Image: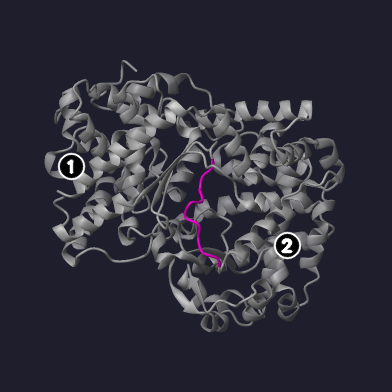
Amino acid sequence: MENIRIQDDLFGHVNGEWIANAVIPDDRPATGGFANLSDDVEKLLTADLQRMIGSDTYPDGYLRMACRLFSLVSDTKRRNSEGFRPVMSDLKKIRSLTGISHLNRQLSEFVLSGLPLPFSVYVEEDMKDSGKRCLYISGPSTILPDTAYYAEEMKEQHDAMIGLWKTMALSVLKHARISDEERTQYVDDAVSFDAIIATLVKSNEEWSEYTKSYNPKSTRTVGTLLRPLKFRKMLEELFETVPEKISAADPRFLQNFSSLFNEETFELYKHWAYVNTALNSTPYLSEKLREAGGTFRRALTGVKTMPSVQRFAYNIATDVFSGPIGLYYGRTYFGEEAKKDVVEMVNEIIATYKKRVLVSPVLSPETREKAARKLDTMKVKMGFPDSIDKIYDRIIIGEEESLYSAMKSVSRIRRQDSFSKLFVPVDKNEWVMDGHIVNACYNPTANDITFPAGILQAPFYSIKQSRSANLGGIGAVIGHEISHAFDNNGANIDENGNLNNWWTKADFKRFEKSTKAMIKQFEGIELPWGKVNAALIVSENIADNGGMAVTLDIMSGMADADYEEYFKNWARVWCQKAKDEYKALLLNVDVHGPAVLRANMPPRNFEEWYRTFGVTSKDKMYIAPSRRLCIW
């Protein structure tokens, strides 16, 4: 935008005109950037799925099942006629609980059915030995999106949000076979139980340090802390062999479990479970219930209307059959020329990153070699996998079953599949993102980076864009994901994906100082919709900084380097227009910084920014050399 000087606001200068004219769809909290590319993928795949359904011709049995699910979701006449009936048997099961001993007799069934319990168990890689898996335990989620909302200083906002939630819950429970008095009691008790949960579980800021989720304890110890639940009996029913250890992902919750769940709080738990089961079911029931059950989330994000039936059907089908649909998308729409070009870019970025760590002032020679080894062993997954998980062979969508029943079956199969792998070696060739996803990631336990075909589009990447633009787009994103191997979490994990201190004491102390400096650079920044929590977003800020540093290094060796285009495309990547409510929510729940800061903060740490646009101390996007940071 011409009236916004680039020296004052890179994000606004590049994206301002588009933002001024962009209209956020009524069923979305934001538009632009990632969201627009996701919309493009959605349009392509929705048209393809509808064409398959119309012709009754499918590439394989998986896509046939995906289309059957798409049709099942789309059959609003059937869902509307079923109303609340599909979930009534689950609600009856919860309502009939007579006490803890009664729950104990069906505890494993509650786990497999996905019915709410005062704890959660799940299987993930063992952080100390990533070739194996471990059983983890944590607490339930709170009603509000973060424990920060339960602090005394946020009481006014907390009460308003809980009021919205209670109104929604009471509205949904009108369809259950309980009296008005019971309905009110159930909702009030659910809020009371939630208030206890909020005092025990981690905040989003605490969860952002994911390496602290590994706290192995003996199964006997966990069972003792979970009394009066018969935890070991449950494990015997869920697993052929009871694991000897369990990792407490949230140790404070486990240590204080007895204050949450006991004979005195059992009725609170029961009513909490009933209300949550009713609310969780609403997306899969009638359109009236789908709308009613989404009112709280829409209020939090500023969204006016629920997604259309077609969009909802697409979201459900692509979630349940993500692997087959991602494979189809990659094979159909991802070109080999683009894949070859981006792979070459990845290899160059990794090589440049290695060169940089080998001369890093933060690291001693001993630690430099170990950091270089982590880069040497880093695997790259580009576009889409060659095959899909065998779990999809077991997901059969019956033509006569309700949508709620179908989704319950899918959920059960997923849990059983996950539990069955507890003692099976980890296949590190598995992908954590499928081909149609518009995103990228670093997987710390596999030490690999994944770039699905969905993100390899303009402005991130195009074979038609200049090399400078591509480096400012997908190149910086590649560098970002590599940097996660060396952020405040990844720094604790070695080249084999294991939790391991591979630093010298002095080196790690210097790195922690740099991390604190990154927190300080963002701490307390005031935006119109709230204040930034720099500790929550520090890992992503380290990664953004590293991605820019390594790609600017590559630019320095290019005869035709266009720094202006590099920085402008960096800003295009983060283009976003969002509802104020949604932006305020993200400040509390998202480990990524606001889009405007992701565009504007990293450049000011690098001399190339100042040189390219003549930025001086009189400009808003200037920071003094002594405050500029380049960790990697």
Amino acid identity at mark 1: Arg
**In the figure, is residue 324 to the left or right of 148?**
right
Where in the figure is residue 428, as x and y percent of width and height?
Answer: 47, 55
At mark 2, the secondary structure is helix
Depth check, mark 2 against mark 1: the one in front is 1
Amino acid identity at mark 2: Tyr
Where in the figure is residue 25, as x and y percent of width and height?
Answer: 58, 28
Where in the figure is residue 612, as x and y percent of width and height?
Answer: 18, 24
Where in the figure is residue 277, as x and y percent of width and height?
Answer: 71, 58
Residue 459 versus residue 66 in the image, above or below: above
Of residues 324 and 191, the one nearer the viewer is 324
The answer to if 599 sits in the magenta stretch is no
Q: Pick the quarter of the image with the N terminus.
A: top left
Rendering quarter of residue 225: bottom right
The residue drawn where x is 49% and y is 34% is 453
The residue drawn where x is 33% and y is 34% is 345
Q: Which residue is mark 1?
A: 628
Residue 310 versus residue 585 in the image, above or below: above
Mark 1 or mark 2, which is nearer the start of the sequence?
2
**In the figure, is residue 284 to the left or right of 550?**
right
Residue 240 versus residue 13 in the image, above or below: below
Using a 10 Å C-alpha cutoff, classify the residue at mark 2 as few (fewer than 14 neighbours), some (14 to 19) or many (20 or more): many
Q: Which residue is mark 2?
A: 274
Task: Find the magenta span and give its range.
Answer: 424-434
The reply to whether residue 306 is visible in this rendering is no
